[in-house]
Amino acid sequence: MRSFGLERAITENELLLHYQPIVSVPARQLVAVEALVRWKHPERGIVSPMEFIPEAEATGLIRRLTFWVLREAMLQANVWRRDAAVLTVAVNLSVENLHDPHFRRFMELTLKAAGGPENLIMETSARALARDPNPPIATLELMRDKRIRVAIDDATDEDAQVLESLPADIVKVGRGLVTKMGRDRRALEYVRAVVNAARERGLEATAVGVEDQTIWARLSELGFANAQGYFIGPPMPAAELAEWRATRV
């Protein structure tokens, strides 16, 4: 995926956001959504972010891409708020975003658009933080000082040190573990270890990749506070999310 194509996509508004529901355990009440970017390519159709996020990070376009995602997500959150359907929105940040010297100003503008920090969660990858020789601890602390909740995403059993050392509010246990824990005892024990480590620090645990009833049935016992996955609801456009939500009210 060439960078000039992605740059055009940002400029000409070829990107769109889908929103995946995050629900409480065990009540299954909608508590937030995760904003997930897609590229509506004029020739290839909908392109997964797995194909263009690495290119954005490698070419320096990640700043513009993240700004676009946050702006659009906050605009949509404001529409929901206007319609008396207030929703917290989680947005993914790369480690490059957290090291960006312009991030502080960017965050202040985002908070003005968000209508308050309680409506915003910033997520970043546990693995990327673990690989970073100089983790952006000051930036994470700054976000929490502003009362933005910080989520460590895609945590695995190898990320105990990350959970112990980084300021955060939420730990999202990765899909790779969650999807296997219904049939793999080792994966189940790894999930239990990550959730216990999170709870010892007072962090809220969210299961990502809940794909069936078997997995859902284990979440409360394991100590998860929230969950997301196709068993609950797939990523969907805002209009479809409104319909999905209406069937559950």
Image (cartoon, grey):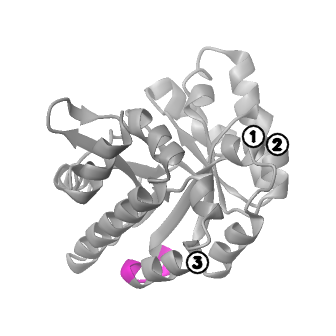
Q: Which residue is mark 1?
A: 194
Q: Which residue is mark 2?
A: 160
Residue 104 shows which numbered tag? 3
From the viewer's perspective, is 150 left or right of 186?
Answer: left
Check the image and report above or below for 227 versus 118. Answer: above
Marks 1/2 in contact by CB < 8 Å: the verdict is yes
Q: Residue at x 20, y 56 (%)?
A: 13
- Of the two numbered discs 1 and 2 on the same chain, state the one appearing first in sequence: 2
Spot the residue most to the front: 4
- Of the two numbered discs 3 and 2 on the same chain, state the one appearing first in sequence: 3
Amino acid under label 3? Arg
From the viewer's perspective, is 34 left or right of 151?
Answer: left
Asked if one can make out residue 133 in the rendered structure from this viewpoint, the answer is yes
**SS at circle 3:** helix
Q: Residue at x 27, y 43 (%)?
A: 39
Q: Which residues are magenta?
A: 113-118
Q: Position of residue 232 (x, y in %)?
A: 38, 39
Asked if one can make out residue 20 in the rendered structure from this viewpoint, the answer is no
Amino acid under label 1? Val
Amino acid under label 2? Ala
Check the image and report above or below for 125 versus 42. Answer: below
**SS at circle 1:** helix
Q: Nearer the viewer, residue 135 or 22?
A: 135
Q: Residue at x 76, y 33 (%)?
A: 157
From the viewer's perspective, is 33 left or right of 121?
Answer: left
